[in-house]
Image (spheres, rainbow, N blue to C red):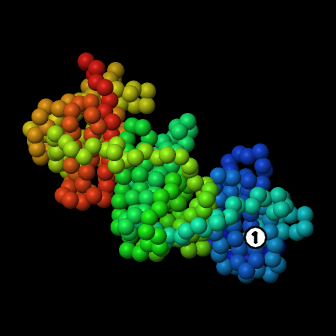
Amino acid sequence: MKFSCEKYLLQNAITTASRASAGKSPIPALEGLLIDAGHSVKITGYDLKKGIYTSFPANITEPGSVVLGARLFGEIIRSLPDGEVLISSDSKNMTLISCGKAEFSIMGSDSADYPELPTVEGLSSISLPQSKVKKMINETIFAVSDNESRPVYTGSLFEIEDNTLTMVSVDGYRLALRRESIEKCDVSKTSFIVPGSSLSDLEKICTDIDDPMTVSLGAKHISFSIGDTVLVSRRLEGEFLDYRKSVPSDFKVKLKAQRTSLQKVVDRVSLIIDDKIKNPLRCNFGMDNVSMTCVTPLGKAEDVCQIEGDGEGIEIGFNNRYLLDILKAAPADNIYVCLNNGSSPCVILPEGEDDSFKYMILPVRLKSGE
């Protein structure tokens, strides 16, 4: 194998594919990247759960392939001066990397040892705007569960119906829902669950432009194609929470709040809470304001945020981090804080008739003196 290319093209491809390479694996090849030079150069990372491959143009004089350690290969390319990089490997997989006067020789391994990525049968195909998907992932992924005892909740539900994409994440303490209309959709109705780790990588691969990504659904796997990059992931199987029945729709109290103002107050009162101190944030909703208090071994913090409406004196406790995640993610300047009592869920909704997001957080039981 022998080819040359611009450093930035190679470095970008390595960074993208390395997201799927295994940190440690009983299969040594999975700790590396498969470099395949044919019509173009394709670089693949795969950890048996998800795979990413991306292609870029290069001057290929000898087609071939080799597997190189992802960490070392990436560090070498990052350290090289800007310019054209020459890469060649011999029959024993010794690989020469050079750029300017810098030169490295590293031992690779046989590409035949690299496991094949699963093929996605393509039972159906969907075209989605990548900028919308990127934004929706960012605003829901915080609520994906990390509890492996319930694998179905370690991913997000994608639901497509009537040219509308709904994305839902739930972890047992909170729920995050985002909804966006799609101008063009190849299917009328479908749903699937994507692992959170794959979504995290997908968010980084997506750009902020409206170019489409192609989603191919297979029986056990799913692929996302974005330009010259493809992410292949297993699908999560199981019964996902019926979010329509789980989120309350009628509320005793509905208060209008300025999102960033509320966030700043929660941030301030949270300063005396750390990872070892789990004391809840005590919120008392009164007439046109909410007072927040927290008492920990470090001291006591209090603050007040102006809101619109009568909270009827409802007192409710929250995990500060869970509440902050929602306030940071909600894509609106003004929100409604919806309550029934101090022991039922709090629901955050957009102002007006907009139904683009819905966040739910379960309360924390308050004890006397907290």
Residue 269: x %, y % from top left: 27, 34
**Viewer-nearest residue: 91 or 130:** 130
**Viewer-nearest residue: 234 or 262:** 234
Residue 306: x %, y % from top left: 14, 43
Q: Is residue 130 above or below residue 113?
A: below
**Viewer-nearest residue: 258 or 176:** 176
Q: Secondary structure at mark 1?
A: strand
Q: Label 1 belongs to which residue? A: 36
Q: Quadrant of the C terminus?
A: top left
Q: Is residue 143 visible?
A: no
Q: Quadrant of residue 45?
A: bottom right
Q: Quadrant of residue 74?
A: bottom right
Count the numbered circles shown: 1
Kind of residue at disc 1: Asp
Residue 369: x %, y % from top left: 25, 18
Residue at (84% x, 68% y) in the render:
89
Residue 40: x %, y % from top left: 70, 78
